[in-house]
Image (cartoon, rainbow, N blue to C red):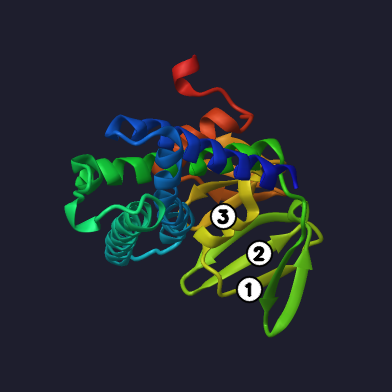
Amino acid sequence: MKKVFIIVAYWLVAIFLTGVLLTSLDYDLGQAILMSLSFLPAAMALAFLLPKVEQTKNKKKQLADTICIILGVMMMTFLLIYLWQFIFITFIYGEDYSKWTLPAMLGNPVFVAAILAILAYGNYLLVKWLDRKYPTDYPVTFTSDYKKITLKKEDILYVESRDSEVWIFARDGQSYRNKTGISQWENLLGPGFLRVHRAFLVNLTDATLTAPDVITVAGQSIPVSRKYKDTVKSILPATFIFPEQI
């Protein structure tokens, strides 16, 4: 509940600050705050949809999805800008809409895209921080061999991707196969788990760096790829001395 309250507070503050920015376009503060609401649906959609794109393994599909999302939220924002201004001019102020022109900055795609990006990225950073500060301890439920399996996060040692399947290895020695991609598992399990290889995700509580490119989890050796090597080195305890430390 605290996380939800903080996120709601973020969007309220963000919309107010956007309204303050829009006062430079000759709106009074009340008008500017109402106009800033035209950015809210698209910014929230952008904040929600772009992290989903990261779960797609196909790079071309990632790029195509990203372009579609950006174009979609831009179109949504411009439509809402014109709609809000039409409401202001014709219904609230009773002026002749045909004599009115949109402020140039609100018709500028770069300006609009910058506001959307700032709002969405701010939400992204906030959610990441909240996940670290207030980790969610809810169990994970998934399907394995047509059976519903529920595990506590702390009972999962590591996750391994094997072609079209992902295997989940539990603390009690059991293993389960699942069709959900490892990137989705990374998002699902959250900050307590670390990606060390394109095919491996490990529980930080049980992982130890036993060689520059090897992690040990419950006696199982897991490779560390070059992409994740520096991150792993900075986070996990090591049982050896790195050559550069000698």
Helix, strand or loop under label 3:
helix
Q: Compared to 246, does 212 lie above or below?
A: below
Residue 86 vs residue 141, the one in the foreground: 86
Indicate the secondary structure of the residue bearing disc 1.
strand
Q: Which residue is mark 1?
A: 177
Pinpoint residue 13: horizontal percent, then vertical percent: 54, 35
Say which label, 1 or 2, has the lower sequence index: 2
Mark 2 lies on residue: 168
Residue 187 — which label?
3
What's under tag 2, amino acid-wise?
Ile
Query: Mark 1 is on which residue type?
Result: Arg
- Does residue 145 lie above or below 246 as drawn? below
Query: 10 Å neighbourhood of mark 2: few (<14), some, or many (≥20)?
Result: many
Report the front residue among 13 and 152. 13
Residue at x 35% of width, y 41% of height: 115
Measuring from the top left, give residue 105's x and y in whole percent: 22, 40
Name the residue rendered at 65%, 40% in the picture: 6
Circles 1 and 2: CB distance less than 8 Å? Answer: yes
Where residue 91 appears, x then y in whole percent?
A: 39, 58
First along the sequence among labels 1 and 3? 1
- SS for callout 2: strand
